[in-house]
Amino acid sequence: MRSLAIVLAVVAVVLMLSTRDHAAVVTTVDPAVSLAEARSQAGYPVLAPVGLGTRWRPTSVRVRRNGAALEWHIGYVTPRGDYAGLEQSDGPPGVFLDGFASGGKPTGVVRIGDRSWRRLEGGRPEPRALLLREGPVTTLVVGGAAWSELDALAAALRTG
């Protein structure tokens, strides 16, 4: 009995030492520099979220030229732990949309603030998208997050 108790104690200690929280470590980024770069280079009003709160964690940001188009991206882990991203470009809208929500089917229009967004569902790689076309600019709010979180991100978007 004592030998069995010792073995079980050793096994318990090993299990306690090897058990870790396997939740993904989220590295946040500061989007300020990239946002300033996008706003200085773009020939259109660059949108960015204002006032989302600290539970929205920015994890990726990018500004890049794609031919003559300027593309702006910021990705978030939402308060519920899902992904939501802002994508904006003044390039060809069909090609840009296909990069984020290819095959998405329109499911209606939602009014968020003073803008009307088209909802798309079932796309790839992102299953949900809000699409806004203003002149030559395409703005997408995309992700696997719930519609309520995507709507919140879209509602927070402001120019300079």
Image (spheres, rainbow, N blue to C red):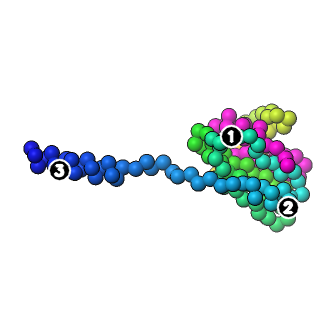
Q: Which residue is mark 2?
A: 41
Query: Which residue is found at the position 72% from the left and 59% from the top?
Result: 62
Q: Secondary structure at mark 1?
A: loop
Q: Which residue is mark 3?
A: 7
Q: Amino acid at mark 1?
A: Gly
Q: Secondary structure at mark 2?
A: helix
Q: Amino acid at mark 2?
A: Gln
Q: In the rendered structure, which segment of residues is drawn in magenta?
A: 132-160
Quadrant occupied by the N terminus: top left
Across and down, in percent, residue 77 comes to: 62, 46
Mark found first going from the N terminus, 2 or 3: 3
Q: Is residue 112 above or below residue 157?
A: above
Q: Which residue is mark 1?
A: 53
Q: Secondary structure at mark 3?
A: helix
Query: Which residue is found at the position 21% from the left and 47% from the top?
Result: 9
Say left or right for 128 vs 136: left
Query: Which residue is found at the position 90% from the left and 49% from the top?
Result: 135
Distance from disc 2 to disc 1, alpha carbons, whole Å, reads: 27 Å
Distance from disc 3 to disc 1, alpha carbons, whole Å, reads: 50 Å
Mark found first going from the N terminus, 3 or 1: 3
Q: Give the foreground label among 2 and 3.
A: 3
Across and down, in percent, residue 57 comes to: 64, 47
Circle 2 residues within 10 Å: few <14, some 14–19, many ≥20: some
Q: Amino acid at mark 3?
A: Val
CB within 8 Å, label 2 to label 1: no
Distance from disc 2 to disc 3, alpha carbons, whole Å, reads: 66 Å
CB within 8 Å, label 3 to label 1: no
Across and down, in percent, residue 94 comes to: 79, 53
Across and down, in percent, residue 123 comes to: 67, 47
Mark found first going from the N terminus, 2 or 1: 2
Is residue 150 highlighted in magenta?
yes
Q: Is residue 1 visible?
A: yes
